[in-house]
Image: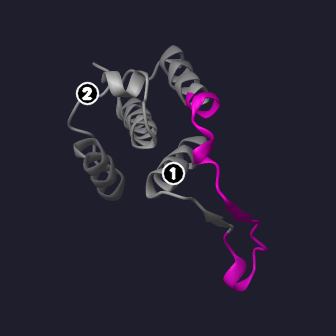
Amino acid sequence: MHVRFELYTALLAQQSLKVDYSAFMLEDFIEPVNDIAWSNRMMWINARVLQWCQSEDRRVEKWSELCAAVHEWECSRPDSFNPFHYREASGEGEDYYSEIWYSLPEHGTAFTLHRVFRS
């Protein structure tokens, strides 16, 4: 919960993260056992990406490592993270944005964080 709040606050206020998230990795994030852990893993990766962006030491090797972590998440995540409904945006009026439905809030959170990273 702390990581989620700190990430939200840092993005909203455009400030640095206070904890060094690259220093350690929780076991639940290495081998997630449920959808909540999978969602938290994407949150953790995004915190590390934000920290990399804000650091003075932005080596390409570290960026490649973070990209690999996102790719690994994409390839390993459970099928439950796939939306059960998707409608493409028309770009006009009420259909300006795509309509995407997930079965759990954790799926939507992970998808949103994943899209932020990919942007």
Instruction: Choose the circle earlier in sequence order: 1 or 2.
Output: 2
Image position, residue 1 (x, y; %): 25, 46
Residue 85: give its label: none
Q: Are marks 1 and 2 in contact (CB under 8 Å)?
A: no
Image position, residue 55 (x, y; %): 35, 29
**Residue located at (51% from left, 51% from top):** 107
Left/right placement of residue 8 relative to residue 87 reads left
| Magenta residue span | 73-97
Question: Identity of the amino acid at label 1?
Answer: His
Q: Say which residue label 2 marks.
A: 20
Q: Which label sits in the foreground, 1 or 2? A: 1
Q: Secondary structure at mark 1?
A: helix
At label 2, counting other C-alpha atoms closer than 10 Å, the crowd grade (few under 14, some 14-19, many 20 or more) is: few
Question: Identity of the amino acid at label 2?
Answer: Asp
Residues at marks 1 and 2, CA–CA distance in whole angstroms: 25 Å
Q: Say which residue label 1 marks.
A: 107
Counting labels gives: 2
Image position, residue 23 (x, y; %): 28, 19
